[in-house]
Image (cartoon, coloured by chain):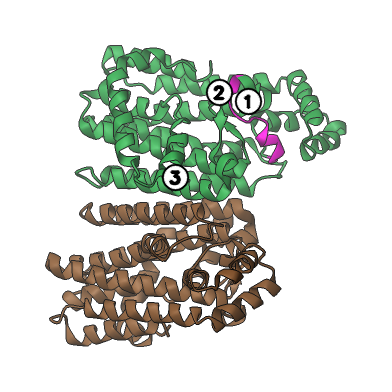
Chain colours: A green, B brown
Amino acid sequence: MQLLKAYDFLAMELEEVREIFEREMHCDVPAIADMIDQVGKFRGKMLRPVLVLLCGRACGHIHPSHRTIATVVEMVHMATLIHDDVLDEADYRRRGPTINSLHGNEAAVILGDMFISHAFHLCSSLDSQSASRLIAATTNTVCEGELMQLYYRGYHDLSERQYLEIIDRKTASLIASCCYLGARAAGAAEAVCLALEQYGRNLGLAFQITDDILDLTGQEQLAGKTLGTDLIKEKMTLPLIHLRQNCPAGQRKRLLGLLSEPTPDQHARLLGRLRENGSIRYARACAARYIQKARRHLPADLDGEIRTLLLDLAGSITA
Amino acid sequence: MQLLKAYDFLAMELEEVREIFEREMHCDVPAIADMIDQVGKFRGKMLRPVLVLLCGRACGHIHPSHRTIATVVEMVHMATLIHDDVLDEADYRRRGPTINSLHGNEAAVILGDMFISHAFHLCSSLDSQSASRLIAATTNTVCEGELMQLYYRGYHDLSERQYLEIIDRKTASLIASCCYLGARAAGAAEAVCLALEQYGRNLGLAFQITDDILDLTGQEQLAGKTLGTDLIKEKMTLPLIHLRQNCPAGQRKRLLGLLSEPTPDQHARLLGRLRENGSIRYARACAARYIQKARRHLPADLDGEIRTLLLDLAGSITA
């Protein structure tokens, strides 16, 4: 995913977001400060802050509240990464060791809590409650998505609709809120805020589908994080659902066997089946359709230069 | 701990708190709703809502914001219980199975997150950000306390000062904030709010010391929760610190051995040593001193009837 143009455009703003982050997370206890620094290394593409800022600029000016909200959503995102790594028992993220692998699950649980807590603390410094209210409603939804995902682990009959409902809640909802909040903080009309929310939602769906494909097909060294956890945790993602649906009845039992015993060898065989069956291609096409949908939601009367950046950004999600 | 008189006095208010809780935590997904119901059973003494409401009433009238804040602090408290049970690998709480023992650590991590998220969501429905700001600052502090406690696990040289710093952050800070917020929402002068905050802080310290004694000396059937986890997790609590400090030099090595191998047999021997050495008595006296201190912080000009309830409530903490 290339956000380079948007980065160049927002370089100074993103630097301020990093500074607000450091200030908010500052801690005098050295052992805690060290762990917070470690999490800071997970900060990657900063997609969510970029969207808050870009959508703000697309609708008008960037205000101080944009930088605060951008920092808050990044903190919320990092909290979900820390707790996700506990759930996935992942060892690597952004080419570095995860908190759980370095300090144990217990520290990772509390540290994730600490990021959520600081996110709301920072958000409550805004003049109005309305951003806090929407962000908290969004984190309610994210938690529901995560719980649904957990509930359906090992359920090989998960439908495409159920899968989309889960990723809509756990991933797309936060990205949608970033776009909505960016537009609203710039004083955009509600219709524009809602259109950008839809842009974000479709972007988020494409993003998660792409991420789920990567978990099956990617190489850990290139991705810089632990992969294959979806199979190990028996999470049915879009390519697997497609394969199950399009598998000849006679081979179904063997497929379910492969899904239940995720050894590296089985993973390799499954990957072969996914490719032969066109299931990876199917999922990629599905992600591409959400990208097109996202682009169509961009209002025509946004700032032209920023509109182009938002169009490009959408394209980079699946690249 | 008997909160009976306060309960009678607040019966209707607490019923409303329960209703706000149900409304806020309502979920249409049956599997998630079931888990939330399970957590609802952990609701025990409702000490924190009681303090918000009593301190409010002690300074004036109970407003709708009191009920909201009372529900929020109870949700925050329940989130910490859920995540604590993950950290402690506890199986029982309030005579029922813990979320982690029923649904696994993963569900417990997310469900705890969900309670935090809903707490901030509910809090952001208030007119002003000020309660959100203080509650989030408090949860920052609680997380620091939890992380410090984790950091010092297995550190047998923990000082009494370090122990008090940890329990001040992880337990007393939230109880102190309950009292402060209750008073402030009733329109009390800042000096009165701060005095009640001190009442709450000292109450909280006494409460945690008493809870730590129970973890060493209590019977699970009576307590209704898993005990002995502090020893298993090598958490140094006040009686153990006292024993270490007052142990003849020649016996120190054996004592540290007992602390490092927490079998039930070793636990029983350690308990014998704690009693012989007066370490349980010492910790009880320490808790009693904090109760006295809490009482002295109660301003003389509070509503007389409520002041008596607050005095009684303090006494019930160590009973």
Which of the two discs, 1 and 2, sits closer to the camera? Answer: 1
- State left or right for residue A253 relative to residue B53: right
Q: Amino acid at mark 2?
A: Ala
The magenta segment is A222-234
Give percent across and percent down for residue B67: 29, 68
Count the numbered circles shown. 3
Q: Position of residue A242 (x, y in %)?
A: 69, 29
Q: Are marks 1 and 2 on the same chain?
A: yes
- Name the secondary structure under disc 1: helix
Q: Residue furthest front?
A: B250
Q: Which residue is mark 3?
A: A31
Give the residue type that dot 3 points to.
Ala
Q: Amino acid at mark 1?
A: Ile
Q: Say which of A215 and A242 sits in front.
A: A215
Residue at point 21%, 23% (across, down)? A60
Identify the secondary structure beneath mark 2: helix
Front in this rendered view, residue B170 or B9? B170
User: Which is more N-terminal, label 2 or label 1?
Assistant: 1
Disc 1 vs disc 3: which is toward the camera?
A: 3
- Give the percent coordinates (x, y) of residue A135: 36, 43
Residue at 20% across, 29% down: A63
A232 part of magenta stretch = yes
Label 2 with label 3: CB-CB less than 8 Å: no
Q: Which residue is mark 1?
A: A213
